[in-house]
Image (cartoon, grey):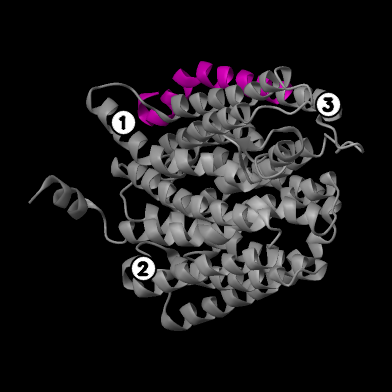
Amino acid sequence: MTTLQQRLASIPPGSGVLFFVQMFSTLGYAVLQSSLVLYATQRLQFGNEQAALMMGLFGAFNYGLHLFGGYLGGRLLSNRNLFVGGMVLQVLGCGAIAGGSLAGLYWGLALFLTGSGLNVTCLNMMLTQRFAPEDSRREGAFLWNYAGMNVGFFIGFTVAGHFQLGQQYSALFWFATLGNGLAILFTLAFWRKLADLNTPLLQAGPKAFWTRFAGGVAILAGLVPVLEWLLRHPGDTALGMKAFCALVAVALVVLTLRHPVHAERQRLWAFLVLTLGSLVFWSLYQMAPSGLQLFAVGNVRMELAGFEIAPQWVQNINAFVVAVGGPLLAGWFASLRARGWPVDIPQQFAAALLLMALGFLALPAGIQLAAADGRVAFFWLALSYVLQSVGELLISPIGYAMVGRLVPVQHQGSLMGCWMLVSGLASLFAGDFSGMVAQPVDGSPLTSNPAYFQLFAQLGTGALITAAILFALRPWLRRLIDGAKA
């Protein structure tokens, strides 16, 4: 048996399938995430602040509902059932938005976000169930899965930019339904391989199973009109979601304090501290589809070697770096650990924040060196995205794997959702940051450059300070993670 065959044979059943399911399911999200602000401002005539708030809520609901999905998956619906149901809602949502009306936007987003918000945690839980808590292959599996997701992003961003340059938004949103449909077909084709392995629902009898199934479907249907109403009241909704996140944080602290097993309680404290540090990273990262995209359109010379660059294509830098870097990083970490080099989660998180800081500090440098018309060279925006993308590899898939490593089995679904909820809260903060720079009446980058310079410099400095704090806490966090060795 060759080395490749041995490696393939060692992959738990279903793990390879999830790579492709992840890739297809990402296409629709990539289209909406990269085009929503442009569609809102260019076609529906939203102002920059209004569009940034809408984008903030898009991210908040998408990630915030992961907490709910973590609870529903494996309790009321199997993770694979919930995933397919969510993808069906995404198909309907993209179709509604393709109609081109304001009402279609709200109902389409409500349908799409209900689906995407609930089913991402399902994918992560289907993958994490296939590894024992101490299985060293878990991190590599999540890095590979993350690479698959970014292949989907790359395709989605590329197509989105093509249609956006011609203002063909209806065709773009119809295209978004394609990936969602393929994800459904692929899941159905490998249905048995994606079965849950260890969830409370598996212990339920046939009558209880179907009762829970009906309840889960009712929740899916009921969430849609609730989200539609909330999207129409963005200011109050954003404030309410921030308050909800604060309550969740308090609940997690109480859960940790009351957890009876000392070693597990120590690891939960490490999880909470690292999650808090990640909030700074994600608050800056989530500016890519809102504030950074508006900066690119208004203040950056969007061309390379004489070719026009669509705003969505800039995000392909991120997708390319992650898709290629994920497997490479997984192999590098394995090699370092085999040679005795300590590579741990606190170190990876601190490095991610350092790279994010450098990425944002590159933008003020570009503004300082802007041309006479105020336009920033594309190089500086590209450099910022590369640095952010490498940082993402050190915190996002590592964070997913961290849930299985640090969280007790009975809380993994809920805390996987909490990990994603942080990205939802960060999306709201990113919307706040993005709305701080108003579009000048004259449309001149010379007018808005000073405000962007101050904003990017402050955010980059904040990330740098957080990275330093997290690195200083590394010995303490390692003792918490080691449990009994503390």
Residue 476 horizontal side relative to residue 172, left or right:
left
Counting from the top left corner in percent of width and height, residue 309 is at 62, 43
Instruction: Say if residue 366 shows up in the picture.
Output: yes
Q: Which residue is mark 1?
A: 332
Residue 447 horizontal side relative to residue 388, left or right:
right
Which one is in front, 455 or 159? 159
Quarter of the image with the C terminus in it: top left
Gap in Å between the C-alphas at discs 2 and 3? 56 Å
| Amino acid type shown at disc 1 | Trp
**Nearest to viewer (mark 3 / mark 1):** 3
Instruction: Say if residue 57 shows up in the picture.
Output: no
Counting from the top left corner in percent of width and height, residue 168 is at 68, 63
On residue 446, which mark appears?
Answer: 3
| Amino acid type shown at disc 3 | Leu
| Mark 3 or mark 1, earlier in chain | 1
Q: Which residues make up the magenta segment?
A: 457-486
Gap in Å between the C-alphas at discs 1 and 2? 31 Å
Q: Residues within 10 Å of mark 1 (few under 14, many from 20)?
A: few
**Nearest to viewer (mark 1 / mark 2):** 1
| Amino acid type shown at disc 2 | Ala
Q: Quadrant of residue 298?
A: top right
Gap in Å between the C-alphas at discs 3 and 1? 44 Å
Residue 19 horizontal side relative to residue 353, left or right:
left
| Mark 2 or mark 3, earlier in chain | 2
